[in-house]
Image: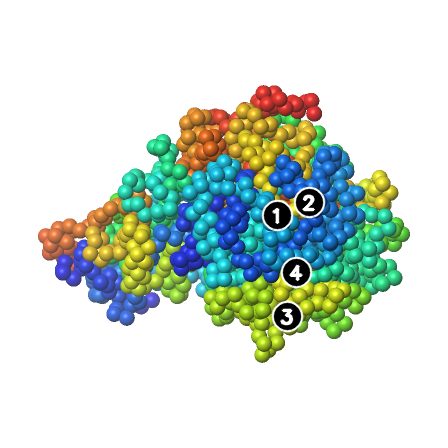
Amino acid sequence: MSSVYRLSGLLADPAGEAGYRDDHPERVGFFTDTSVCIGCKACEVACKEWNLVPEQGLDLLGQSYDNTGALGADSWRHVAFIEQRVPDPSVTSSGTDLGMPGIGAPEQPAAAEEGSGMRWLMSSDVCKHCTHAACLDVCPTGSLFRTEFGTVVVQEDICNGCGYCIPACPYGVIGQREGDGRAWKCTLCYDRLGDGLEPACAKACPTDSIQFGDLDELRERADRRLAELHQDGVGEARLYGRDPDDGVGGDGAFFLLLDEPEVYGLPPDPVVTTRDLPAMWKHAAAAAASVAATVVLSFLGRRR
Amino acid sequence: MAECHPVGFQWVIEARNRGAKVIHVDPRFTRTSAMANEYVPLRAGTDIAFLGGLINYVLSNEKDFREYLIAYTNAPAILREEFADTEDLDGLFSGFDPETLSYDPETWAYEGAEAAPAAGRRSDIVGDSPPEHSGPDQYGSGGATIGAKPKVDPSLRHPRCVYQVLKRHFSRYTPELVEEVCGVPPEHFRRVAEAITENSGRERTTAFCYSVGWTQHTVGVQYIRTASILQALLGNIGRPGGGILALRGHASIQGSTDIPTLYNILPGYIPMPLAEHELDLDQFVQEDAGQTGFWGNMRAYLVSMLKAWWGAAAAEDNDFCFDYLPRLTGDHGTYQTVLNQISGECKGYFLVGENPAVGSANAKLQRLGMSNLDWLVVRDLQMIESATFWKDGPEIESGELRTEEIGTEVFFLPAAAHTEKEGAFTNTQRLLQWHHKAVEPPGEARSDLWFFYHLGRVIQRKLEGSSEPRDRPLRELVWDYPCEGEIREPSAEAVLAEINGRGPDGPLSMYTQLADDGSTSCGCWIYCGVYADGHNHAANRQPGSEQSWVAPGWAWAWPDNRRILYNRASADPAGRPWSERKRYIWWSDEQRRWVGADKPDFEPTKAPDYTPEPGAKAQDALAGDNPFIMQTDGRAWLFAPAGLLDGPLPTHYEPHESPVANPLYGQGQNPTRQVFDRKYNRYNPPDGVFPYVFTTYRLTEHHTAGGMSRDLPYLSELQPEFFCEVSPELATERELEHLGWATIVSARTAIEARVLVTDRIRPLRMRGRTVHQVGLPYHWGPNGLSTGDAANELLSVVLDPNVHIQEAKAATCDIVPGRRPRGESLQRYVDSYRRRAGIPEEADR
Amino acid sequence: MGIRRWIASWPVYRQLTGSDPLGRGAAAKSRGSRELSPRTHDADRVVRSICPYCAVGCGQQVYVSNGKVSQIEGDPDSPISRGRLCPKGAASKQLVTSPSRQQRVLYRKPYGTEWEELPLERAMEMIADRVIETRGRTWQEHDARGRRVNRTLGIASLGGATLDNEENYLMKKLYTALGAVQVENQARI
């Protein structure tokens, strides 16, 4: 069983594995190139306008220009702002001594360099649409499911608000909506994909920091962009979530970052939280089969 | 640009990715700075010194584009012996009258050329009440007239040629002076200077983008002039990838100047006539129109406009109703109007999508003006502060005004949104873009087109049969547009057709068809052609992907769908591209016309070797190698022999309120700035009471004074309340806590804001002295979802003399921790500051 | 619905008989998901427009369903914006459909303490009367120095720069015919 339905490790075709026929569409995703993100938050607004996501409250957070704070039920895109001091204004790369996210009042500067010596990182975060999505694995109602595009979507007509998916997500993406109780997160605009449209955030993004497309093509594009930046001396540029060999089998939404993932509030080495489930399942396999048969009978019986 | 024009910024990112160097100069580190190769923080209000430093760098290292300079600018023109520079007169130019605080520009003229006659005649109306003199806007935006073409020295060696005068004028703007004035270290300055000069010349161009960070100063016009001089020296005007691009902040702010709701001009930048004895059409045209260049046809433009307005009533024998135009006697700009409201002269006020109660400098002055009106009409989408000041404005809270004592009758009329009406916006690139109507406006909401059309109709009906001479311009006004639908919406396309103009054969296609004999009508000559062949070209929408990069099939640019102005300068004097890399418009010998990617901003068949006959007029007087066709001499003006009220060359003056003295001259500030020192508009003296500089600005998440953003949940949650930005150093100095409250004080009032302590604001070190700056986004007010005090409460009214724009980008303040006092104690608190600073208390007047 | 189809539509049946025995993909697809279609798909019409915020002039496509704006997106054909919008442009639907938009004329009497409702037609008549009266009362044929001016300084106007060109044109034309010279715009601010 575990050799066919893997919850971790390399997996080329998550949609196929989830039962879609071979002619299902290519897996799609986001490549977010933070080196051109201007932090305008068009993605946040376009997402909310399209998906009718409620306003999440007016709070001045003081986290630079970020007043969204984190991804959640009412924020499916979140732009992080990180203010950093860098030694020399004319050199964009440094890679050292960049410190942690600039949340709260900055430290008092040591003898400031002349010139600017300032770096302001911005990055639009979103659900990663993991190859191995723990949220989906733990969902008891089948609300969270893998779409034919390889993306992971909460079905609002199924979700009963049990909340199991919330701690399962290694990125802390999913939230429960107040007054509604259901879990909500980015759907990668599942409804739009079906009509051949790109997701609202990617369409709006002024500088094309958020790119939508077939995942394979996006990965190639990201590799080229990374090489370009390295050639231009931006040594600290790196890809995050691109690697199909990582703890979640690679992300459907991955990033080009200019610093360590922690700086952006991203876990450095995310692991699918259900990695060890298959081993447990082996022991439960026989029991599961008989329970399934009983379930069918009992449902049919009730119908009559 | 990334902050306020994010979608336009995609092209900067694209250029950067292709190797362009992006330099950002700004007092605060913005989203643009984050994307720039070089960020240069400088003290607010010192850009002329910075740009002047660049000019000096170009001149002293001979980095100018010499062929362009000699052929296309007035660098070789020789000036009069009588001209004296600020370097000679400690910060003043020759011709200054200390009594009227104004200049007589006669000595600024070219040698042998007559002084500008228009200015001579007009000088008698300067100063209704000096020293609060109100310089008239003398030249519209049509440029000044000069009597004749200059004598030139192409070798540029004549000591009085513009090139040499310029060199002397800017010689003290060294990297060290730039550091002293702007707080920019010399090394940093040099990197910018090198980048700009390395990227200019035949093969490369540099572009400048600016916004109100340059215009909202008491020397705002001269800021733009400084950039113009630099770009002309480097040969960066009229060429692709060059220019000076105003990034305008509102959908149709360009259109609002082209077809102006501005007091001093008529459509197409024709000046409004001034009050003069026995001024008739011919005399007006003679005084205001240049004899040479395209302004030489101003009579045709004006007569056609008068025909569009008064139709059959406008005839040769009545001067085409020229007398129906009301006359100006000075500054009738928005700030002067507010003072007239307070004095009781102005009694009725229309606010049409504008919110001065929080959006104009010295917001209190605005509200006091509105409180003293007989009637006020407010048209807007939401219940803005300018509609509710009588009920819940700050003066009600402080007890200075009582609702029951405010006599203003207020009409609030809901407005239609852009999706509920059709019409054209003119964007920042001069593109007229049509927006179609999607749905009907809700309830009693109506378009402004509807409101003004039907208001005019009702007024005309009420005046039917009037025999008052003053009512004739109204009764005879052509005011009959077809209406559509249940709400009787006037046809915007019919109005556009009138703006475009008609001749005996129907819609006109080009302003050169306009006649001065009454046979053509045209509401705005520069828009002539937008409705050519009866087709609405503003609605053209050929996809960008299906046409050349110039994209002429998308919308329509004035004039004549030309996308880059003065593009004749993209070719050399002989008409060949300066370089293959930068070719744009060039002369084709085979076709005997100008060809290229754009329409030529030049007569299409005027050959490069064309030489005018002596005595030629209008465009015929310009040679085939004079690209600047709106100028009387066809050249870009490094030195402005006429047209400006505050000097022919830009000079660094300190802002009206500044913590430092002018290091260059004894003359500290622009001597001709408009000052209104009076009750409710006191100024901060340059002492220690108001030791910090503040500047105001926008954030991506909001729009201007917030009328279109503070009521929207999705925008409000992104920037939920008013804040100020300070450096960690200033926070320490004043014990300001991150996310705590601060009170910011000027002689006008005190406001409160949450504090963001950030490295993005830097103290500037200027040769041993440190200047702290406070950043204030100005989007807020008390109404809406996202609220806060208005930054505009802090600002005073002090204006640029040429264009009467307020100095909103540099002023002084104090900042202390904690919230501001409320009620009457706020007055006492501000009074205590005034006392300490030696300013008369408000009770004293 | 026949019993076979009913069973076939039943997720647990699909899960056990289909290619998705764990019920994580095809078998878990809900009715809502199967019938999902973007609301732009069924729009009655798509209207070309221009963003009303800054002067970049981004192209917009306004989707209309049942006489209401259902979505506003960037216009990919625009060579200026290429389909993109900033947060303000992206919030345009909220701008035009805002529930706090005023939809009725409101009137405040001199010295009044509250708003009152006023029919639009009546407001237009009243405003026209005010204009005519104020104009007559403040009319200047000559200024203090005897120069003919033909104007009123009693009436002023300040417009925002989201006015259409055609609106600005009618304003300038009417005000000038009224002799009102204090006609101003955000463009000077």
SS at mark 4 in the image: loop
Type of amino acid under label 1? Val
Contact (CB < 8 A) between labels 1 and 2?
yes
Q: CA distance from mark 4 to mark 2?
A: 23 Å
- Residue at point 62%, 69% (across, down): B608
User: If you read the primary sequence from the N terminus, does the residue marked by circle 4 or circle 2 appear first?
Assistant: 2
Residue that mark 4 sits on: B634
Tell me what residue is drawn at x 54 percent, y 61 percent.
Answer: B239
Chain letter of disc 2 in the image? B
Residue C129 makes an appearance in the image: no
Q: Is B85 on the left or on the right of B502, as rendered?
A: left
Judging from the image, the colouring scheme is rainbow
Residue highlighted by disc 2: B83
Image position of A21 (left or right of B758): left
| Element type where label 2 sits in the image | loop
Residue receiving disc 1: B165
Q: What residue sits right under mark 3 in the picture?
A: B609
Res. A195 image quadrant: bottom left
